[in-house]
Image: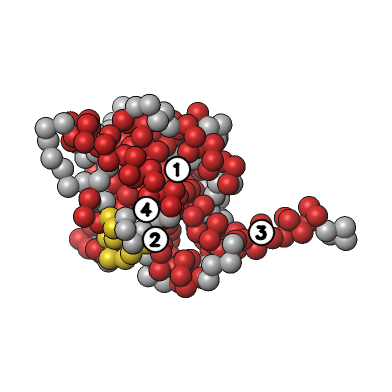
Amino acid sequence: MMTDKKLIDEFITSLRVEKGLSANTVDAYRRDLTKFLNLAGRLERSLMTIDRADLVNILEMLKRDEMSDASIARFLSTLRGIYKYLLREGLTKVDPTAYLEARKAWQTLPKFLTPGDIENLLAVADMNTDAGIRDRAMLEVLYATGLRVSELVGLKMKDLDLETGLLTCFGKGSKQRMVPLGKSAIIHIQKYFPARYRLAGEKSSERLFIEKGGREMTRQKFWKLIKEYGAAAGIDYITPHMLRHSFATALLTNGADLRSVQMMLGHSDIGTTQIYTHVTDEHLKNKYKQFHPRS
């Protein structure tokens, strides 16, 4: 069986030879397909094993990463193209892009955890081990700040100001923002410092969250950790980004204004933040239906 890279190379060749597309257009196809493989890899999928639900998940990832609607539409068009090619060549019998409407795919409401789910998740980490103490601190910080997972693992010691209860993070485009930490996160960071010293051993690191021997915590490793903790907490499906959704939803449900939430999340466009108002609207409607006698 040909590898994904080989399949993509042959598809690109067909575009260049059979359709005579320009070099720029062909490069755009290759960029989209490289991005697709990277995202599919995070889901442990490939061109031949991905299904429609996985593809919807990937489109949601792109929207969370603030890719424009036009770019997402082009990305999906590229995928339609390669699957049409694979079908024509008899290399696959399944097209996961079939009947997939692009806009509906990425405009599903964000999935978030209930306060009970959050409590169960935080309680799973083993506080008798250095790794467990670190993981609890990471989960606390993630839920307290709404950071992206890349921002979380990229935090440095100097980014913390525990006296004022703030941390500084660098988001997309190296944009700097300050986010409040909250008491619980501060407490667990302080508990983590002695564990961090033991994890570092003789190696120094400027990163806040590290593995044994001072190695940097990676995004992939934290994805794996949170998946394991979610399963242990009885949560069927969880990603680091769901804690970001939960952070935003909790703030808006309890009366925070949209502009403040936008600043804390680091959204460049308030329209991206407004999706959470739909979540809170649905929450209110469900409560009304549940408790109002005339609902």
Between 237 and 47, the residue placed more toward the observer is: 237
Q: Are marks 4 and 2 in contact (CB under 8 Å)?
A: no
> Which residue reaches farthest front?
163
* Neighbours of disc 4 within 10 Å: few (<14), some (14-19), many (20+): many
Amino acid type indicated by mark 4 = Arg
Q: Which residue appears at 83% of the width and 58% of the height?
A: 292
> Is residue 126 depicted above or below 121 in this figure?
above
Amino acid type indicated by mark 3 = Glu
Q: Secondary structure at mark 2?
A: strand
Mark closer to the observer (2, 1): 2
Q: Which residue appears at 26% of the width and 51% of the height?
A: 155
- Can residue 17 be spotted in the picture? no
| Residue carrying label 1 | 239
Label annotation for residue 282? 3
Q: Secondary structure at mark 3?
A: helix
| Residue carrying label 4 | 148
Q: Alpha-carbon distance for marks 1 and 4?
A: 11 Å
* Neighbours of disc 2 within 10 Å: few (<14), some (14-19), many (20+): some
Q: Are marks 2 and 1 in contact (CB under 8 Å)?
A: no
Amino acid type indicated by mark 2 = Pro
Mark closer to the observer (2, 3): 2
